[in-house]
Amino acid sequence: MKQKRKVLIITYYWPPSGGAGVQRWLKFAKYLPEFNIEPIILTVDSKYASYLQIDTSLEKDISPDLKVFKTKSFEPLNLLSLFFGKKNVPYGGFTNVNKKSILQIVLRFIRGNFFIPDARVGWNKHAYKKAKEIISEYNIDTVITTSPPHSTQLIGLKLKKKLNINWIADFRDPWTDIYYYKDLLHTRLVKRIDEKKEKEVLGKADKIIVVGKSLKEIFYSKINQEKFVVITNGYDEEDFEEHKHIRPEKFTITYTGTLSDQYNIAAFIEVCEAIKSKGVDFIIRFIGNVAESKLNEFKNAGLLENVEIVNYVSHQESVKYLYNSSALLLVIPDFNGNKGILTGKLFEYLASGIPIVGIGPTDGDASEIIDECEVGKMFDYSNKTELSEYLESLIKHWEDNKINEPDDEEIEKYSRKNLTKLLTEIINKSI
């Protein structure tokens, strides 16, 4: 049997950390051996990490044969937590804090200007040292770095410069074009330094993988080279095998993940208010963190009694909630350049087959995929008329106990195994 090619994957987020970013490379590592590639993982020791979420249930996907190396890290976010309390330390999207408070302005300024490109950069020196040892011991010729945090890409950059290894950089989000970038309060000098680091990473990497076409266009405008490849996020078939659709007692719309200030749901709330006035009883369920401003919007519309908040749950629990829903709410943050946002939840939504109610750019990547898979509709932020018609049609279908019939063949393109096959082709062509 042909010996497996060994590939080093450097990722900050790894179980017991939770969230969609963890699952991307956890699932790739799960399926790569089936394509004759042996992944070796380098990550941060959870005792030193500053994870936003914990989900030990994801550890079930780590094969006992998988080599996982962990290192120490210097985490300024942990220090800030000691001084100011964990609830006051802002994280991506800033949904957990009041951005206008003096304390938060100071903390965001510190985070944006003293830790470039991000507050996980303290892991780099430990990870770089260990990466060199692993590359030497296992005779590795290909290294993959994945971000965010984008500081992880600087590890790949240094390895490329020092060892001239083949380097593939994977981006799940934009870098200096991320929607909350301005909230980091960078000085002009720091912003230039950050942009220079981003451009150097894009220029030096041998291949760049991105999660969507629009993100590819963002980076392509900075480095005009034919090195960009799109591999979206996806869903793992095995996570959905044992679940069955359960008809909820009330029409239930479920949203999973963070809902921050940038998520414009004003039209959705107004439509729900109108539907309620017609005597329709329903539940809007949020699984994850919801900005207080959004809860106030529901309160002002008289919908607070229809809102159900579920704190962060394991991945397996979140899948159960999907199957116990009548419709799934997908919201793309409202800002310029949002067409490329492809959240991990979209693909889990697809796998469930439950109708998706999308709010965001109708010419964006997410809208295109929803249309291709015939699993729902995307509506512009202000399109109350069509959104209302669609929601009422879903309620009627639910009342009539009708089942949604998406295009299963299109959905299967986004299975983790099929996406890993694409990754394998990139790895094998890169040498």
Image (spheres, helix red, strand yellow):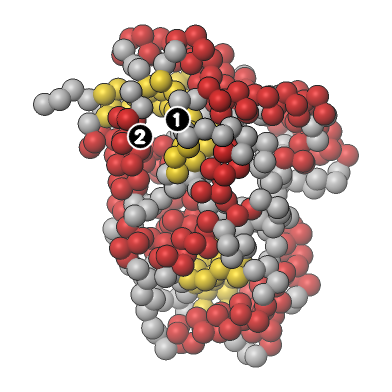
Which residue corresponds to the image point at 81% horizontal and 35% vertical from the top-left?
A: 185
Count of numbered marks = 2
Q: Label 2: how many residues lie within 10 Å, few (<14), some (14-19) or many (20+)?
A: some
**Looking at the picture, how far across and down is residue 207, in whole percent?**
45, 30
Which residue corresponds to the image point at 50% horizontal and 21% vertical from the top-left?
A: 156
Task: List the residue tagged with mark 2.
Answer: 426
Task: List the residue tagged with mark 1.
Answer: 207
Q: Tags 2 and 1 in contact by the CB under 8 Å rule?
A: yes
- The secondary structure type at the circle numbered 2 is helix
Left or right side of 398 for 361: right
Which residue corresponds to the image point at 70% horizontal and 27% vertical from the top-left?
A: 194
Can residue 369 be seen in the rendering of this structure? Answer: yes
Left or right side of 65 for 103: right
**Looking at the picture, how far across and down is residue 145, in whole percent?**
48, 27
Viewport quadrant of the N terminus: top left
Q: Label 1: how many residues lie within 10 Å, few (<14), some (14-19) or many (20+)?
A: many
